[in-house]
Amino acid sequence: MNKLMLRGALCLGLAIATVGTGAYMTSEKLGSHSHDSGTALERIQNSPQYHSGRFHNKKQPAMAGLFEASWQWLKQSQIDKKPAGQVPLETISTEDLSALNKNEDVLYRLGHSSILLQLDGKLWLTDPVFSERASPFSFMGPKRFHPSPLSIDSLPAIEGVILSHNHYDHMDKHSIKALIGKVKHFYVPLGLGADLQAWGVDKQRISELDWWQSVEAGSVRLTATPSQHFSGRSLSDRDKSLWASWVIQSQHSKIFFSGDSGYFDGFKEIGERLGPFDISLMENGAYNELWQGVHMMPEESVQAHIDVRAQRLLPIHNGTFDLAMHAWYEPFERLLQSAAQHGVEVLSPAMGQKISIKNSEAKDTARWWRALIQEGQGKQAKAAPASTHTDTNPSATAARAISAK
């Protein structure tokens, strides 16, 4: 496969997971189902976010078309699209989870936006993606940089799964089907229930929420809050289901989970109405100026964290899949630089590292990606002769700055 064909395939994977309509075909296999008649459909039609047959953002963001994004992907020089070595990972066993202090709220980052939470002694999952690729296809699309720190088989009972929207890098059919026997209940934005039911989840185990609606799940209170994004898994279902961020509150802690979003004034409203938070799980990755309205730049992620009034920031949506044109490590470094300017404390746990939601500090986590950057630079230096060429690629500039630290 030549370079042009390879980039074309990668571009297709990008569009599938993040930028485009969500897929290039409509089929029952991919997951694009009509909504149930009756109550579910009535709730969708009565939503303030729903009109003209689709859900809408409060203010519709500008976003490049698929052709423009594909063309830039093909022509732009790209470096460091994946780690040069093995991503540090701490495996999690069933025994580890059983031994957790039930009175302490903790989290584990599993990769991308998948987070395993213990809240009030029970386990929860956000946007679980355990598959090898963030794609409807097993043979193409964005591939994981690292395995999951634990398998679905090793998970004990899960109190609830929280989904932010239906893109393939957040709502994975294979993972959902494998989790059905372990999960008590699924909490999703309006419109996602139809797919879950088609995949085998009983509708009595699904709660669909509109923005600002809340539900009690034992001692945990969940509130679906606004985000600025879009939805779609096929050419025919663009924005037929809602997207959301989430406020997750237990007896011991309060968490903001951003899902996917461009920067908008809704973050400040969330902070004013429902903040402050112990921690924000904030999107930071897969960004580009062409689709900045639906994916934040790192500096905007820091501002969103400030807006929601969270104490510590844990950046997500990075380090697992190649979904954009920036170097794989660039989101971390740009966010850290902005966070330092604003006095924001950033947690950067290794995949699978246990984090205490109330008590962990930045010093408890390492900037683990920097060793991999240096490893990649070493390999490049051995493979290429010395050159006086000045590289203006921002990712290359970031890499040189990191190596100088």
Image (spheres, rainbow, N blue to C red):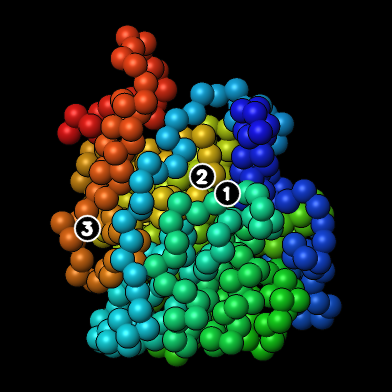
Quadrant in which residue 36 is drawn? bottom right
Which sits in the foreground, 380 or 61? 380
Q: Are marks 1 and 2 in contact (CB under 8 Å)?
A: yes
N-term mark: 1 or 3: 1
Q: Residues within 10 Å of mark 3 (few under 14, many from 20)?
A: some
Where is residue 5 shown, x and y percent of the image? 68, 32
In the picture, residue 204 is in which quadrant? bottom right
Q: Is residue 384 above or below residue 139?
A: above
Three-letter code, disc 3:
Thr
Q: Position of residue 44 (x, y in %)?
A: 73, 69
In the structure shown, which secondary structural element does the residue marked by tag 1 occupy? loop
- Near mark 1 (Cα within 10 A), the count class, few <14, some 14-19 or many ≥20, is many
Asked if residue 200 can be seen in this view, the reply is: yes
Viewer-nearest of labels 3 and 2? 2
Q: Which residue was labeled with disc 1?
A: 142
Cα separation, mark 1 vs mark 3, equals 27 Å
Q: Is residue 49 visible?
A: no
In the rendered structure, which disc, 1 or 2, sits on the residue that comes first in sequence? 1
Q: Position of residue 370 (x, y in %)?
A: 27, 42
- Measured as percent of width and height from the top left, residue 192 is found at 68, 69
Which amino acid is tagged 1? Pro
Which disc is residue 97 wearing? none
Residue for point 51% across, 24% down: 77
Q: Which residue is mark 2?
A: 322
Give the quarter of the image for residue 167. Answer: bottom right
Q: Is residue 33 left or right of residue 94?
A: right
Residue closest to the eye, 306 or 340? 340
Q: On residue 365, which mark appears?
A: 3
Q: Residue at x 64, y 77 (%)?
A: 177
